[in-house]
Amino acid sequence: MSEFVASDNRLGAYLKDRRAKLDPAAFGFAAERRRTPGLRREEVASRANISPTWYTWLEQGRGGAPSSDVLDRIARALMLTDIEREHLFLIGLGRPPEVRYRSEQSITPRLQGVLDALDPSPALIRTAIWDVVGWNRAATVLLTDYGALPPEERNVLRFIFLDPRVRAAQYDWESVARLVVAAFRVDAARAGAAADVEPLIDELCRKSPEFLAMWRDNDVRTHGEGAKHIKHPVLGLLSFEYSAFQVDGRPDLSMVVYNPATAEDVAKIKSLLG
């Protein structure tokens, strides 16, 4: 029981601290005659569309465990960043929030620098619906020239099912395709992106009978790590060990790194990168 109360107290202290850091005038509230800085409890409750009494109880540690929907509304009311929202869920519910899909097609320069530093290992950043939004030079040379394509076409499922060159490069295309479809299904559902992927799924079902059959199988799998083999037109057969990581602070993004499996593979890639 004491552990639960301690968690409640941390939640209340965090809410109070975030509330105190907000400027009332920025939200259209009168700034005069305030005994303490920041928004009032009833103002946060109004912005979150919850009862002022319920919000007050949460800050006082008397409200019990809030629902994820309530925490989401409070996070928006307090203008929390992604990492602040994650911390709110961790102290309020003991777990991180669900992944939220974003449609933005960019990454930070610092994250791009991480990708570039990984050469000669091909590395890329993909969204929850498997759009590629970042890559390094090794990925361009060995996998796909993503920069030569418009953003809406930089999707892994499109490459696997609609690009003959990418298909020919797969050592075992069917196994790769089944893994991609099954892992994509998990990521898209986890991110709540069903509406966003519907046009892509409809298009692939029309254009690829193989995709239609695999999608109807309803398989689900993870894509955390494994082995990959590609047939490069210049270097021949290359082997990789890949790992996928969530980007810290951006749970809607994953970094996938393909490490050359042998010293010979490393040497081949370096010779091509020059």
Image: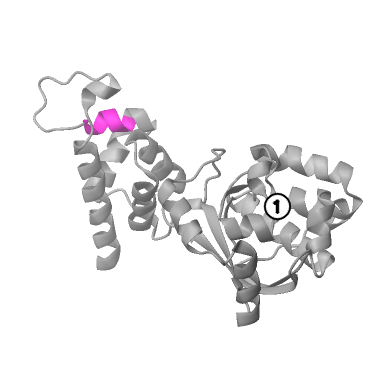
Q: Would you say residue 174 is visible in this rendering?
A: yes
Q: Residue lying furthest bottom in this view?
A: 263
Q: Amino acid at mark 1?
A: Val
Magenta part, dominant SS: helix
Location of residue 118 in the rendering, given as x and y in whole percent from the top left corner: 50, 64
Left or right for 229, reference 2: right
Choose between 132 and 5: the one closer to the eye: 132
Residue at the disc numbered 1: 156
Tag 1 secondary structure: helix
Compared to 130, does 177 lie above or below?
Answer: below
Compared to 241, does 177 lie above or below?
Answer: above
Choose between 143 and 98: the one closer to the eye: 143
Identify the residue at horizontal 88%, vertical 55% (top origin). 210
In the rendered image, the quadrant that contains the C terminus is bottom right
Compared to 24, does 187 lie above or below?
Answer: below
How is the rendered protein coloured? Answer: one colour
What's drawn in magenta, residue-wise?
39-45
In the rendered image, the quadrant that contains the N terminus is bottom left
Residue 49 magenta: no
Location of residue 145 in the rendering, given as x and y in whole percent from the top left corner: 67, 50
Identify the residue at horizontal 37%, vertical 57% (top origin). 90
Left or right for 37, reference 45: left
Compared to 257, does 124 lie above or below?
Answer: above
Residue 44 magenta: yes
Identify the residue at horizontal 68%, vertical 55% (top origin). 184
